[in-house]
Every structure is written in C-alpha cells, then in structure tokens.
Amino acid sequence: MKILKKALFALSCTVMAQGAYAQQVSDNVVKIGILNDQSGVYADFGGKSSVEAARMAVQDFGGKVLGAPIEIVSADHQNKPDVAASVARQWYDTDKVDAIMELTTSSVALAVQGLSKDKKKINIVTGAATTDLTGKQCSPYGFHWAYDTHALAVGTGGALVENGGNKWFFLTADYAFGYSLENETSKFVKSKGGQVLGSVRHPLSANDFSSFLLQAQSSGANVVGLANAGLDTSNAIKQAAEFGLTQSGQRLAALLFTLAEVHGLGLKAAQGLTLTEGWYWDQSDENRAFAKRFMEKTGRMPNMIHVGTYSSVLQYLKAIQKAGTDATEPVAKALHEMPVEDVFAKKGKVLPNGRMVYDMYLFQVKKPEESKSEWDMYTQLAKVPGDDAFIKASESGCQLTQ
C-alpha cells in the first residue's frame, strides 16, 4: 500500500508540474509558422522542404516543450511583401502563432520583421540574405540564421579576386536582396584591389536574360557576378552558356547558389562554379545521417536553408525550455545568450543585433566525371571562419548595439 501511495504521489506531482509548465505557455500550445516561397522562383531553395525540416526539429525535440504540444503551420508568401505581411498579421492576431521563421526573399523578411517588432513577436530568418535585417532594420526580437550577403561576398567574392577575377560586372535582381548582395560584394572586391565596371538590374522571375548578358559580355569584366538566386541564377547560367560567356574567358560568380539549384541545373552546366554555403551533406558522418533522414522524407538532399530552418526551430524550442515560458522577452534573451550547437552549426553564437555567427564554406561544383553519386556535387575549397564571414555587431548599423 505504501508503494502504491508513493507511486500515486509521484504521478500527481508529475501531472501538477506539467500543468504548471503548460501555464507558462500561451494558449497551451507553441505554434511556429514557416512562411516562404512554395510555388515560385525560390520553391526549391527553401519551399516545402523547409517545412519538413521544421517538423523534423519538433520531432527531434520530443514533440512538446514545457509540457505543451508544438505545432508547425506554413504558408506560401508568393514573394510578395504585402501577402507575407497579411499572412503574418493573421497568424499573430487570430491564429496565435508565437514565432515566424524561414522568410525567403529579403523584401518579405524585412516586412515581416517590422511587423513582428511591432507585435513583439520573435522571427528567425534563414531564407533571406540582406544584412539590413541585423543592420539598420534590426529588431530586439529578430534573428538571422544561415547566411547573409556579407558572408557570400567574403566567401565567393574574396576567392575570385584572389585568383585573378579583379574586374566585375553585376547582373542583379531588382529588389532589396539583389541590391544588398551587389553592394556587399562590390565593397569587398574594391577592398581587395578589384574594380566594378558596371551593373544591370533584372526583374524577379525573368525569363530572358539576353540583353543583360550582352551588356555583361561587352563590359570588359573578367567576372560576371550573379546577384540573384534560385531559378533566376539557373536561367542566367544556362543562357550565359548559350552566349559563350565562359568560353570567351569570363567567369560566372553565382553569389547565392545552393545544392538545390546545382542539382536542378545539373553538373554539366554548373561544373566549375564557385559558391558559398553554410552546410553540405557530405562533410561529416553527422551531416550524412541527417541528410539520409531528410532524403527519406523529401526525396532530396538538404541545403543550408533547409538545415538552417531545422536549427532555428530547434534553438527556439531550447530557448523556451531555458526561459521556462514562451513569452517573447525571456525567450529572446535566451536566444541571445545560448550557444548554437547542433547538426547545422558548431560553436555558433548570436550577436546583440540578432546575427547568428558560425563558419561558412567555399565550394566548387564538381565536373560530371568527378561525381560518384547523384548528389555528390561539391569539393570544399576553404572554410571561412564565422568572425570573418559576418559583420561585427558594432559595425552593422543596428541601433541595439549603440
């Protein structure tokens, strides 16, 4: 009888503890929104595979935090800031979403981060690139994971200048991301003694790059910097081959190109490209094991956006656990304080402006004859230490660091 009483007492204590924890969770559920492009030019870049990565993080965390269930919701923002803001407002005001993540497309990410700041909600960006997110438009509740335009400029831009690519012409996507990527790379090229001979801007989801490529071809540049992403970069590379740019001695710098786009383009067209990513599936046994699980769920290998989304969701849940609540202020504090140590980042750290700093990698796309399997696509050329890849918080222009 005494043993039974002790067991019942222990059970009641457990139930009471879970109830107390759940009271620290608003609406007794932690709801995370994955908002990204699921049908357009960046659908392979992040898309529904990022949603699956978020679900994997929830599964690996155990499905609950502080005794409350964790729910993932998702939506397609169509690369339109007004659509994204409308969805985010609905999620926050009506659907009781606690945090929004991924946010492919810089104009979208900036719009949602601004709204999140007003609503005092946490957002973590993995799919957008502009340094303004942790610069002049930073937020105490905004965080930037995975990569940014400065890291891409340091990695790919730096490597090409050091190897003779000292005269640049930019083919730039005509919105915030493209401007930021061109600006960051231009500054880095000039700091290394290179020249920028000109640039031309193209609309998002362009089909015909012929007039832009003709300008690049006649510019006298030895490097054509593609300050775009997704299908825009793939289409520009295909059409550049048709125009004979690389055959004439010009090099293409894919400033934001990931495994998803390389696979879509194929090694025959992409071979020799130099690019920067923050993660690759074949770097370690841990990465290979994660990639195998991801492949089983999605039919593809993950890129840095997918694994970065996994990491950001996992870290957010760890922060709630540490804070003992899902309230924004203490969770944001925990996110700033906690190291990031998972399959995505080793010894990662979050700066006062919300930038997560970790090591980036410079890769070269293999030739078809060098590849041993469908997704064996990269040769690692160098590691770019996180402190070199990302802007110091004190130099970012973020008012939170003043």
Image (tube, rainbow, N blue to C red):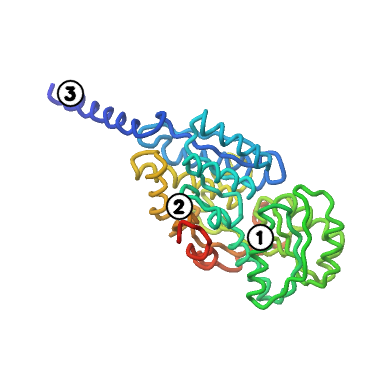
Mark 3 crowd level (few <14, some 14–19, many ≥20, 10 Å Cα): few
Name of the residue lying farthest toward the top:
1
**Residue identified by numbered label 3:** 4
- What secondary structure is found at the residue carrying circle 1? helix
Residue 181's label in the rendered image is 1
Relative to 28, 253 lies left or right: right
Image point (56%, 58%), residue name: 278
Instruction: For marks 2 and 3, give the one nearer the viewer.
Output: 2
Image point (77%, 71%), residue name: 197
Image point (56%, 46%), residue name: 292
Could you tell me how far apart the alpha carbons at marks 3 and 1 are, in whole angstroms? 66 Å
Q: Nearer the viewer, residue 329 or 149?
A: 329
Q: Nearer the viewer, residue 158 or 194?
A: 194
Mark 2 crowd level (few <14, some 14–19, many ≥20, 10 Å Cα): some
| Disc with the residue nearer the chain's start (3 vs 1) | 3
> Can you give x and y, in whole percent of width and height, for residue 210 in the image?
86, 57
> Can you give x and y, in whole percent of width and height, for residue 335 in the image?
42, 50
**Residue identified by numbered label 2:** 342
- What secondary structure is found at the residue carrying circle 2? loop
Instruction: For marks 1 and 2, give the one nearer the viewer.
Output: 1
Q: Nearer the viewer, residue 141 or 218?
A: 141
> Can you give x and y, in whole percent of width and height, for residue 334 in the image?
38, 49
Could you tell me how far apart the alpha carbons at marks 2 and 3 are, in whole angstroms? 41 Å
| Disc with the residue nearer the chain's start (2 vs 3) | 3
* Quarter occupied by residue 198: bottom right
Relative to 310, 12 lies left or right: left
- The correct choice, above or below, for 33 with respect to 238 in the image is above
Could you tell me how far apart the alpha carbons at marks 1 and 2 are, in whole angstroms? 28 Å
* Quarter occupied by residue 219: bottom right
| Disc with the residue nearer the chain's start (1 vs 2) | 1
| Type of amino acid under label 1 | Leu
